[in-house]
Structures are given as C-alpha cells and as structure tokens.
C-alpha cells in the first residue's frame, strides 16, 4: 500500500485555487466580481489554527539556518481546545509567524528549546519582549538541554541573554529575577540519560530526552494531552535507539529532513538522512509523519528524499510548510 504524501506547497495551491476559481466564473460577465472573489478566495497561508476544540499542531517555521528557502527557522505551536499552549523552538522568523498564527503569549504553558543553534532559539528574546506588553504575570516554564564544554546549557544561555548583569538584553531581566511586571521564566535543564519529565498539569504532560546531534547538546520533546501524543525529534542523527522507545505511540512525529542519503562527515554526525528517518518512523509507527526543517538543498531533491522515507515507512507523510495546521 502506497503511503499518502501531502505537500502543502503554498504557491502551487495558490495557482490551482486561481484556476479553479476562474473556471467557476467563466460565464459571469462582471470582471469586477471575479477580481473580488480572487482576492479573498485564494491564500497561500493557513493563518490561525485556533479552532476552539481538539488538538492541532501548527508549523510556525519549517526551514533551516540558511536564508534561501522562503521559510522561518524551526518552530512549532500546539493548539489545545483553541488556546496556543505549547511552543517548541523559536528559530529565526518564528516571532513573525507566532503573530501571524494569532497565538497569544498569555496562553502559553510551556516553551521548549531543543538546542541552542540560532535556527532553534534566536527569536526567544523577541517573543519575550512582545510578551512583556501582555497582561501575563504567571510564570512561564521553559526547558532545554544542559551544557558541556562546547555549548552552554539553558540556564547559562538565559543569563547571557537576559541577565541585568551583562546580559545582551539586560532590559528584559525581569523574566529572570522577577523585578519587573513580567512573568518569571522557570527554567529546567534536561540531563543526559533517561527521559525527564519537564512539565505537567491537569491535562498536559511533557517529557524530554537527549538526542545525538554531533557535539551539540540537543533534546527531543514528547507532548501528551488526552490520548494524543506529539513527538518533536528535533535535529538528531538518528543513531540512538532510545529515541524509538521515547517516540513510540506518537500520533504525530515531527522529524527534520536536512541532509540527503549518503551524507558524511559533520553533516551525517548532525542529521539523520531520509533512509534513517524512514527506519525510525517505521519502528515508531506514528499516525502521521511530518518532514520539516527543509532548506533549498533538501528541497531540490524533495521527491527523491520523500521516496526514500516511503520505502521504509508506509504511513501518512506531510511535507511541512510554514503556518500549516496538522491534526491527528
């Protein structure tokens, strides 16, 4: 059975929408009416996923670190019963997408940073600054990796970014020390080893697991709400079998398809190629697989790369686009 692949390619859908709309208006004399319909009926972006019920994943950023793909960098938002409650990653461009999605800083229950590369964390200060204008006062839990000799951990990153004592954005220090009318960040560093519980509430549980990403400390997140499970694999090379157990039972599995099959050297130590992604997905058996973190170099061979994933994983595949809404 051939897997079902959906690619939310904005420009192709946009053109198709134009053609369909023109066909439906061929026999209508008024070009003014036609122009009016075209202006509102066709859109390249999904906008908000705030439906008011159920659980929906909205992809804020489906791109990578290079400004050549017309995409924001890594960012994902979970809507639960009409509220924007979980943000995973805040790469460059997600600040803009957060606003375009109609998300509300006051509704956030949790922020997870998978690792401290700029394409996963650079927009956090901008999001916090925006949130400082809201009425939110309750603390905001945030989790990320611990540090090592090459990279800081989450706590050191927040101090270097927000501390009143030499932080790059020290004027936002209220998020760290509670001295201003801003919500206090409550950071949790994820240690290596077994999965860690990083957040829990009445209807939400979030676990994290270190995953191999070269020398870069990185963590995957598993978000459970009701009977739905969302797993964000983040950047990883796919070599640790512990991730398969961590991700098993996922309703939606988000994996990053950055490098081609045959990648070697640093690229392979950092990222899983399509064949490995397919093997992981086949073992995890999610309800849907979302392929994200795409760049021009991976988009060039997109059909071939997806086929390599399909050769191993036979379920539904969604190729990510910014602002797309994905339901279990």
Image (tube, helix red, strand yellow):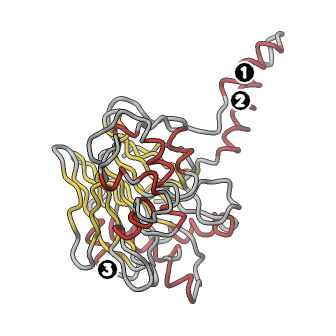
Where residue 283 appears, x then y in whole percent? 34, 71
Q: In this view, does 151 lie above or below 204?
A: below
Residue 24: assigned label: 1
Nearer-N-terminus badge (3/1): 1
Residue 20: assigned label: 2
- Which residue in the structure is indicated by mark 3? 241
- The answer to whether residue 189 is left or right of residue 117 is left
Residue lying furthest bottom: 265
Q: Residue at x 32, y 31 (%)?
A: 53
Crowding at label 1, few (<14), some or many (≥20) Cα neighbours within 10 Å?
Answer: few
Where residue 131 appears, x then y in whole percent? 43, 41
Tag 2, which secondary structure?
Answer: helix
Tag 3, which secondary structure?
Answer: loop
Residue lying furthest top: 29
Nearer-N-terminus badge (3/2): 2
CA distance separating discs 3 and 2: 47 Å
Where residue 245 appears, x then y in whole percent? 26, 71
CA distance separating discs 1 and 2: 6 Å
């Amino acid at each position: 059975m051939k897997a079902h692949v959906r690619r939310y390619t904005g420009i192709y859908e946009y053109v198709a929408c134009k053609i369909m709309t023109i066909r439906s208006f061929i026999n209508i004399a008024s070009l003014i009416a036609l122009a009016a319909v075209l202006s509102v009926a066709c859109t390249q972006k999904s906008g908000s996923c705030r439906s008011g019920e159920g659980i929906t994943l909205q992809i804020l950023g489906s791109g990578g670190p290079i400004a050549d793909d017309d995409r924001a960098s890594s960012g994902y938002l979970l809507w639960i019963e009409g509220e924007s409650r979980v943000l995973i990653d805040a790469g460059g461009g997600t600040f803009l997408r957060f606003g375009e999605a109609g998300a509300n800083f006051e509704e956030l229950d949790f922020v997870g940073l998978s690792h401290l590369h700029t394409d996963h964390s650079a927009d956090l200060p901008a999001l916090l600054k925006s949130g400082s204008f809201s009425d939110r006062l309750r603390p905001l839990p945030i989790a990320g990796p611990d540090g090592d000799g090459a990279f800081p951990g989450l706590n050191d990153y927040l101090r270097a970014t927000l501390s009143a004592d030499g932080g790059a954005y020290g004027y936002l220090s209220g998020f760290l020390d509670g001295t201003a009318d801003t919500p206090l960040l409550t950071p949790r560093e994820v240690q290596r080893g077994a999965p860690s519980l990083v957040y829990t509430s009445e209807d939400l549980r979030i676990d994290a697991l270190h995953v191999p990403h070269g020398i870069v400390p990185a963590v995957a997140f598993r978000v459970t709400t009701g009977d739905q499970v969302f797993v964000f694999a983040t950047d990883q090379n796919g070599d640790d079998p512990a991730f398969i157990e961590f991700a098993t039972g996922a309703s939606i599995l988000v994996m990053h398809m950055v490098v081609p099959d045959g990648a070697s050297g640093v690229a392979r130590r950092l990222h899983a190629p399509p064949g490995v992604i397919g093997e992981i997905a086949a073992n995890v058996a999610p309800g849907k697989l979302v392929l994200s973190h795409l760049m021009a170099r991976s988009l060039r061979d997109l059909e071939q790369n997806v086929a390599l994933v399909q050769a191993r994983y036979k379920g539904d595949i969604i190729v990510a686009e910014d602002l797309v809404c994905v339901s279990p």
